[in-house]
Amino acid sequence: MHSKISSGIVISVETFYQQEYSNPKNHDFMFAYKITIQNSNLFPVKLLSRYWHILDSNGMVKEVEGEGVVGIQPVIQPAEKYQYVSGCNLKSELGRMQGNYVLQNMHSKATFIAEIAPFYLTAPMKLN
């Protein structure tokens, strides 16, 4: 599991190779990732948007931006956590993701960015 603290937000990532949704012969590799977002600030925050930079070992780059995560914009109270699971498909057995969340301080209405540290997506056959 990878974790990073940024702007009082602790972001932890756990990744999983999805063999049942992958087809290596067609260069389709599916990964899931579980994100835990913990608010260490003294104020509630709302997750407004996300940005992902995704790179596979073939050099293919994808950028993904959008509102919220998995269709919602959660409000996370101080000392509380929010978890969600999402996925990413690659054309190679190895990739890297990193990005950020734009959050809003629910008291001051100011927005700020919490960075998501780079993490790797690795198919088990690549480890052999």
Image: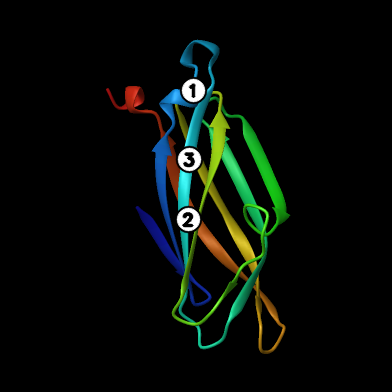
Q: Position of residue 50 (x, y in %)?
A: 65, 57
Q: Is the C terminus in the top left, top right, bottom left or bottom right quadrant?
A: top left
Give SS at disc 1.
Answer: loop
Which label was assigned to residue 32? 3
CB within 8 Å, label 1 to label 3: no
How many residues crowd around disc 3 within 10 Å: few (fewer than 14), some, or many (20 or more)? Answer: some
Q: Which residue is mark 2?
A: 35
Q: Position of residue 106 (x, y in %)?
A: 66, 83
How many residues crowd around disc 1 within 10 Å: few (fewer than 14), some, or many (20 or more)? Answer: some
Direction from residue 60 to residue 110 in the image, left or right: right
Residue 66 or residue 2, whichever sits in front: 66
Which label was assigned to residue 79? none
Q: Position of residue 44 (x, y in %)?
A: 58, 82
| Residue type, mark 2 in image | Ile
Placement of 58 over or under 24, stated as above or below: below
The mark that comes first in sequence, 2 or 1, is 1
Quarter-wise, where is residue 54 in the image?
Answer: top right
Q: Is residue 57 visible?
A: no
Q: Is residue 114 visible?
A: yes
The mark that comes first in sequence, 1 or 3, is 1
Q: Residue at x 57, y 29 (%)?
A: 59
Q: Which residue is mark 1?
A: 22
| Residue type, mark 3 in image | Ala
Q: CA distance from mark 2 to mark 1?
A: 21 Å
Placement of 50 over or under 43, stated as above or below: above
| Residue type, mark 1 in image | Ser
Give SS at disc 2.
Answer: strand
Residue 50 or residue 7, whichever sits in front: 50
Q: Residue at x 55, y 12 (%)?
A: 26
Residue 122 or residue 84, whichever sits in front: 84
Direction from residue 110 to residue 92 in the image, left or right: left
Q: CA distance from mark 1 to mark 3?
A: 11 Å
